[in-house]
Amino acid sequence: MSIKLLTRAIKKLKKKKPAVNAENKQSEQWVYHPDELKKINVMAKLENNLALLKNILGQNQDVIFRSFLLGRAEQTAAAIVYIEGLVDIHVLNNNIIRPLMAGLRQLDGSRAGVSFQELLTGSMLTVSNVQAIRVIDDVVAGILYGEVILFVNGQAQAWSMDVRKWNTRDITEPVSEVLLRGPREGFTETLPTNTTLIRRKIKSPNLIFEFLNIGRVTVTSVSIVYIKNITAPDLVAEVKSRLKRIDIDGVLESGYLEELIEDNPYSPFPQVLHTERPDRVAAALLDGRVAILTDGTPFALIVPAQLTAFMTSPDDYYQRYFIGTVIIWLRYISFVMSLLLPSLYVAITTFHHEMLPLRLLVSISSYRQGVPFSALVEALLLEFVFEVLREAGTRMPRSVSQAVTIAGTLVIGQAAVMASLVSPLMVIVVATTGLASFTNPSYNLGISTRLLRFPLMLLAGTLGLLGVAFGILMLTIHLAGLRSFGLPYLSPLAPLQTGDLKDVLVRVPWWAMKTRPAELVKRNRRRQAGDLKPASPGRRKGG
Amino acid sequence: MARMMVLLWLVLLLVLTQPGCWDRREAEELGIVVGYGIEPAAGGKVRLIVQVINAGAQGQGQNLMGAAGQGPTSIKSYTNLVSEGDTLFEAFRMLSTKTGARNIHAFAQVVIVSEEYAREKGLSGILDLLDRDPVTRRSYWLLIGRGDLASLLDEPGTLNPIPSMRIGEILKHQSLAAVSAPLRLGEFYRLMESESAQPFTAVVESELNQAVPGEKGHEVSEGSIPEPLRQIKLNGTAVFRQDKMVGWLNEKESRGLLWLRGEVKEGFLKSPSPGGTGKLFTAEILNTKTTLLPEIKDGEIYLTVKIKAETYLEETQEPVDSETVRLLEAAQAGTIAEEAGAALEKAQQEYRADVFGFGEAVHRKYPGEWKEMKNRWPELFPGVQVSFQVETKMRHTAMISDPVMPVEK
C-alpha cells in the first residue's frame, strides 16, 4: 500500500513538472498523515525523497530545500531541508554546509574501510547531535521540530542534526507568584530552558526528565520530572499512564493537561498545583511529588496536590519559621473568611441578631435604614460588582486598570453608600472578603472560593446559619472524598498524619524538618542528618 | 453519580424554597428592646413600658454612647412604648398595635418593677412570663423603681442617652461603692423559690441633679446641652418576703446585707479614726470572706458570722505607723460589725425576711433537722442568735505613709 501511495505521489509530481500552477497545487498536496508516512522509508534516490517531501511540506514557504553537490568531482547530489527561523543559521552555514561542500574531498566514498556513514558523522559534520534516520515520518517530524535534515543521493537514509535556535523570552521574575525573598527566576515558554532551570537546582543523577509528545496536531513536548530514588514508582507510573491516555489535537497550555488528568473533573477545587517557579518545583520534587512541564507555557504542573499545598508559598520556607507559621495561619483564616464572611454576615444580620454585640447591631441597623434591598440581595449585588471590577482590572492594560480602580472605589465605595443602595458595613464586608481572597498564594484555589461564596450566600440568606452549616458540611464531605492522584485532598489533616503536620499547622524550622511527607514517600524518607539544631559553641551537644 | 448530583440539587432546591424564610428579619426592621418598666394601671391591669433603641437616630451623626452633633432638636435615640393588659403577655402583644418594629428581647438590660406594684401585687404575676418565654433571658437585672416609671425611663442623660442602658452601665460598676445589692432575674427566681432564703434587689430612683447650675446669670453656653435636671441613682435595697416587697435597706444596711452574704468584692470602708478625735479614715476593700457557722443547742439556733476583710488605706487625717495600723484594723472590724448588725436588725426583726441565706447555712450543716425546720423557718428565723467575729487586715498604706497635713508651726 505504501509503495502505491509513493508511486502515485511521484507520478503526480512528474506530470506537473516543472512549473506547478497554483490552482492545481492545492488539490495535489499530500495530506500529512503520520500513519502512512511511518510506513515509508527514506529512498536511495535523492530526487524521490525531495519530491515526496515537497509534496508534504512544499506548500509551506518557510521550508527551505537546499540542494548542492558533494565531493571532489562534485558528482554526488545532496540536499538539506529545514525550516527557516527554527535553526541556527550560523551553525548551519559553518558547521554543516561548509564542511560538506568545501572541506571534503574524500567524499567519493573510496577511502578503504570507512563507510560513508562513518565518514560523514565522524569527520565532517561538526555539530554535536547527528542522527541517522530512515523513516520519512521521522524526517518530517524532525523538520517540523527544527532539525536540519541531510539527504545524500545513493544513501537510503537521512541525517538529522539538531541545531535548533529561535528567539525566546528571557528568564524573568514570575508575575503570578511574587516573593519577597527567594529566587527571582521563573519558567519561560521553552521547555529546554525550563528543564535547565530545574537541573540547575537539583544536580542529582537521580533527577529524571522523561519526555513524551502530546497533541496530534501540535505535537507538544511534555516532560515528566521526578527524582528516581525519592518519588514513589507507582506515582510516576500513574502520571505516565494518565498522560499517555490523552489523545487530543492540541495542547497549548498546561491547563489542558490539568483538566485531562485530574481525579475529579466536577470538583470546584483544583487538584493539580501549577507554578511558574523552578524553586517551587524543586521543593515539590524533594517532597516526592512529580512535576509536569509543558512546552510553550511557563506553568509547570505539580501532582499530587492536597488542599494545604495550595495554601503554602515558597516564601514560608525561606523566611524564618516564626513568621512562616504566622503567615500560614493568616492564610487559613483568610481562606475561611473569603469563603464565609459574606454569608456569615447575611445569616447573622438577618436571622441571629442575638449573636452580635448590641452596639454593632444598632450600628448595622442604623446604617441599613433606607437601604432598599435585603441583606442577601445587597451582598449578592456588591459581590457581583466586586467580581466585575476584579475581572476588569485583570484583563485591562495597566494604564486602563487604574481608571477601573478609581471608578470602582468611587462608585462602589462612596456613591453607592451615599445613594443608600448599599450599607457601608456591607462594603466593608465585601472589601475584606476580597482582600482575604488575595492572600491566597494559589490563584486557582482562590477561584473556587470565589465561586462557592455565592451558593453559600444564598443558603445563608434563606436558612441562616443552619444553611451555612449545611453548606460547610456539604463542602467538607466533598473535600474528604476528593483525591489528587490518590492522595486524600485533606491530608495530612484527614486522614491524620501527625508527622506531616509540620508543614501544615506550623512551619517547623528547617533543622526539625527531618522527614518527607509520609503520604507521598515510602522509602528514603529522611531529609537530613541526625541533629542539626544549631546552638552557640558552649551549648552544643557533645562539645 | 450524575443522577445523585441531580437529585441532590433538587433536594437542595426544595429545602431552600419550601420552608421559606419565616425567621428572617432584616436588621433595620428590628426594635431592639433595652429595658422594661412594669407598674400597676387602672382597673387592676398591668402597664408595660418597653424601651426600644431608635436605630435611625443613631445613624444621624450620633452613636450609642452619645452625642456628636446631638442637639435638643435631634431625634431621641430611644422610644418608650407603653401598653396595658390584664396579663403581662397581653400587654406585650398589644404593643404590636403601636409599633411596626419586630421587637427582639435578647439585649434588654433591666426589668424595672415599680415599688407600688412590688409591694401590693407581688412579682409572681409577671416573673412567670419572663422565665417561661424563650426570648427573654434570666440575665436581665431586676430592679425596683421608685416613683413614676415613665419618667424614670425617660430621664435625659448626656453620656449615655438611653436610660435603660445607663442603668445597665451603673449596675456594672456599682460594686465600687457596694451600697446596694442588685440581682439578676435568674438569681431572684432561685432565692424566691428557695425554702431557706428570701430575695432582695436594688432600688433605682431619680434624684435632683446637683450639677445643674443654681446661680442666676450662669447661662448655658450656646449650642451646648444643659445638664439634665434629674439623674438616675441606685438607692439601697428592697427586701422581699416570697414575691412581695416588704421593706427597704438604706445604703449602710445594704452594705451589711452584702457583708452577711459574703458579696462585698470591692468598695470603700469608712471608719472613725481610733484617736477619738472624731475624724474619719477610709480604706479600699481588697478582698473579703464571710463564713456562716450555725449551731443548734438546746433547741436554740446560734449563728456565728465570721468576716475576714483585707483593705488598704486610701485616706486619713492622722499619722499612721505600724502601731496605729493595728488600731485602724480594729476600728474597721467594728464598722463592719456595725453595718452587718444594722442589716440584721432590720431584716430579722422588722421585715422577718431571711435575705442573708441563714436557712441555707443551717440546711447545709443540719440536713436532718432542717426537714422539720423548713416549714417553720419564717417563724424560727427571727429567733436566730447571731454573733460576729470580724477580722480585718490593712495590707498597705498605698503610695504614701504619712497623711498630707500642714506642719504645726
Image (cartoon, coloured by chain):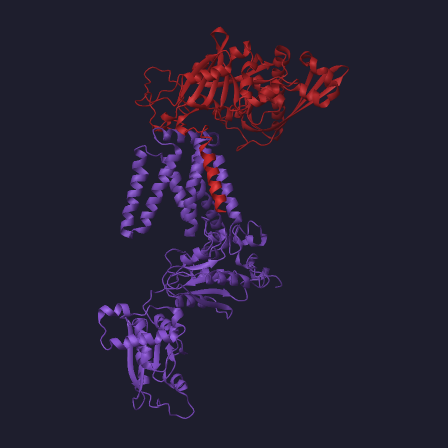
Chain colours: A purple, B red
Q: Position of residue B196 (x, y in %)?
A: 66, 18
Q: Quadrant of residue A386?
A: top left
- Extreme right residue here? B298
- Between A429 and A164, the residue placed more toward the observer is A164
Instruction: Using the image, determine if residue B302 lies above or below residue B392.
Output: above
- Between B315 and A304, the residue placed more toward the observer is A304
Does any portion of residue B310 appear in the rendered image? no
Residue at 54% across, 18% down: B129
The mark tally for this picture is 0
Q: Position of residue A281 (x, y in %)?
A: 46, 61
Q: Position of residue B80 (x, y in %)?
A: 42, 18
Q: Position of residue B150 (x, y in %)?
A: 44, 14
Does any portion of residue B362 appear in the rendered image? yes
Instruction: Using the image, determine if residue A242 lies above or below residue A116.
Output: above
Say whether residue A399 is left or right of residue B235.
Answer: left
Instruction: Using the image, determine if residue B26 lies above or below residue A284.
Output: above
Say whether residue A405 is left or right of residue A257.
Answer: left
